[in-house]
Amino acid sequence: MNSTKTQAQKQAFGLSYSEIEALSHQAELLRAQAIAEGFSAFAGAIKKGLVLFNDWVVEPCSKALKKSNLYRELSNLDDRTLAGLGISRSEIPYVVMNAFEGNTTEANETASVSGFQALTAVPIKTSSNDGDQSIAA
């Protein structure tokens, strides 16, 4: 009975069995291609979302944590050590505010070192020097 139905379908479309098989195979390939394109678009959207999350959440939080650590470390230094670095105690907020601005490569390179070590590696601008200087430790 099933073969009779298949024969009737073949006759209804006026196609041979090999033509029906070829169309069926082509339909499967098109379906697979559409699914792959859908997954690719989904993966692209996920990637874009992760980049935005990194830019809007992770990086600002990381920068705030670095600044907080640097402020704490500089505040714990005595006035003589601060003067040796070329900054006064009243300039600590200004130095911290500008310490990680500018070249992101330099900030990323200093991410693994302490805030004090980062201060010695990153050019900073103080109100007294009004220029970018690397402070040597």
Image: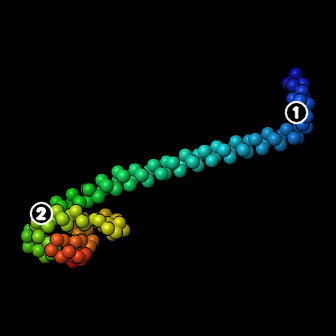
Image spot of residue 117 (x, y percent): 24, 69
Which amino acid lies under the numbered mark 2 shown in the image of this protein? Asn
Q: Residue at horizontal 38%, vertical 55%?
A: 55
| Vertical side of 64 occupied by 110: above or below | below
- Rendering quarter of residue 91: bottom left
Circle 1 residue: 13
Looking at the picture, how far across and down is residue 8, in whole percent?
A: 89, 27
Which of the numbered marks, if any, corresponds to residue 27? none
| Residue 76 - label | 2
Please identify the quarter of the rendering in which residue 12 is found: top right
Marks 1 and 2, how far apart in space? 87 Å
Q: In which quadrant of the rendered view does residue 106 lie?
A: bottom left
Which residue is drawn at the image coordinates 83% and 43% (left, top)?
22
Taking the image as shown, residue 100 lies to the left or right of residue 24, namely left
Q: Is residue 3 found left or right of 125 in the rendered image? A: right
Q: Residues within 10 Å of mark 2 (few under 14, many from 20)?
A: few
Tell me residue 48's x, y (percent): 48, 51
Query: Considering the image in quadrants, where does the N terminus appear?
Result: top right
